[in-house]
Amino acid sequence: MSDSEFNGPRSASSSEPLRTLLGEPPRERADAARNRAKVLAAAARLFREKGVDGVSMDAVAAEAEVGKGTLFRRFGDKSGLAAALLDERERGLQEAILSGPPPLGPGAPAAERLAAFVDAYLDHLLDHLDLARMSETASPGARYRIGAYRFWRLHVAILLAEAHPGCDADPLAHALLAPLAADHMTVLVAEYGPARAREAVRALVPE
Amino acid sequence: MSDSEFNGPRSASSSEPLRTLLGEPPRERADAARNRAKVLAAAARLFREKGVDGVSMDAVAAEAEVGKGTLFRRFGDKSGLAAALLDERERGLQEAILSGPPPLGPGAPAAERLAAFVDAYLDHLLDHLDLARMSETASPGARYRIGAYRFWRLHVAILLAEAHPGCDADPLAHALLAPLAADHMTVLVAEYGPARAREAVRALVPE
DNA sequence: GGCCTAAATGGACTATAGTCCGTTTCTGTG
DNA sequence: CACAGAAACGGACTATAGTCCATTTAGGCC
């Protein structure tokens, strides 16, 4: 997966020529949309029944009644499929950050928003640990290529810059998100339980 | 790899019965030792020539003139092989921590030793990024199963407990090591260069 | 030196991810 | 409506990790 060539249903707006003029990406074909939905439904079903690790891509393709080629071309690889499933569930959190009530949404001091973000993100992550783990660890660097990661990172960087003027916010945001990696949280929770794990991560947030 | 059933040449001390009485692990057989050395040499050679990612386990087995079964039984999986190669190079750092001069070794205040450790670890990591990456990301959770990780974690936990009495040092040490993951540092360095990457990680160290 | 047991060996075998490309299906246009 | 080109399809194919077990070998003991 080289970037965001995969994923995400495209908008069904604009006539063909207008779209072209606007430089919008071409609309997704009807059969493609249908297959995307079939695959996501099949994957959700299988993952729920047998666990994320117990399901092969062949199995997903079969369950979705779709060829393997289709599956891979659309989602890139297994981590892409997991990311697509997570995506739906991350929307709510992203909206709450952009326009929900403080301290998660705008309005509270940056430091408080940062703490609220970490808490809310952990809530989300601990609810979908296995899916997140698959999306992040299927291949090296996978985590950082997911679109959602960029969102979290940008959000954290903006808050850091506001709370600590003069700090090198961009790489710092990266580093701050590192302990939130699914692989890491899996181990931390297994070893110390959710409460201590959560506290340890929160203790690293500046201020 | 369930634990440390693999790796590490065993000591050649003690007679058979004494060893048994002492509960030491059985001495490694001569052919096993020979093959371990052949594999490590072959892997080092191939990795240097073609890069860690460009070498299959089949290729390592062939180059070492050893069966695939031998290779896997001894090293568990690809990450185990990479870890075994790294191991040799980590010894120096571990010794410097245990008995070298301050601030890395004993003698300096805990906070200073912590900073010195992060610096030294990053030196080591950036020198062997590809090998470390393979050892940590070949399978989910691989990083946390490597013996060396336990060493770093214990060291950091002890220093944290000393520098910040009352903090929950064990999980905090885990969290503090998260940004030092090879996969994360690879991205951070690629995006911002070694200097800013290093600074960002150091900024997270308490105090 | 020859025997015996546990350890080690190696390569055939399985399972799975991911690629490739000839065929089929859309959809905008005349 | 029918045509043409683009887009999507699907399954055979390749590459690789990792398992299994019948066979071989080391080395302690007499």
Image: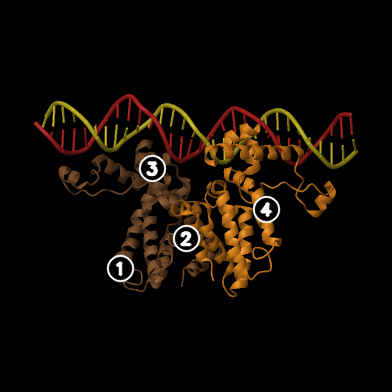
Chain colours: A orange, B brown, C yellow, D red
| Residue B81 - label | none
Q: Nearer the viewer, residue B198 or B60?
A: B198
Q: Is residue B135 visible?
A: no
Q: Disc 3 versus disc 2: distance between alpha carbons? A: 27 Å
Q: Quadrant of residue A61?
A: top right
For the residues carrying marks 3 and 4, which lies nearer the camera in this image?
4
Question: Three-letter amino acid code at disc 4?
Answer: Arg
| Residue B175 - label | 2
Q: Which secondary structure, mark 1?
A: loop
Q: Which secondary structure, mark 2?
A: helix
Mark 3 Cα within 10 Å, few/some/many (few <14, many 20+)? some
Q: Disc 2 versus disc 1: distance between alpha carbons? A: 26 Å
Q: Where is mark 4, residue-wise? A: A91
Circles 1, 3 touching at the beta carbon (< 8 Å): no
Task: Report the chain holding disc 3.
Answer: B
Mark 2 Cα within 10 Å, few/some/many (few <14, many 20+)? many
Q: Disc 3 versus disc 4: distance between alpha carbons? A: 40 Å
| Residue B100 - label | 1
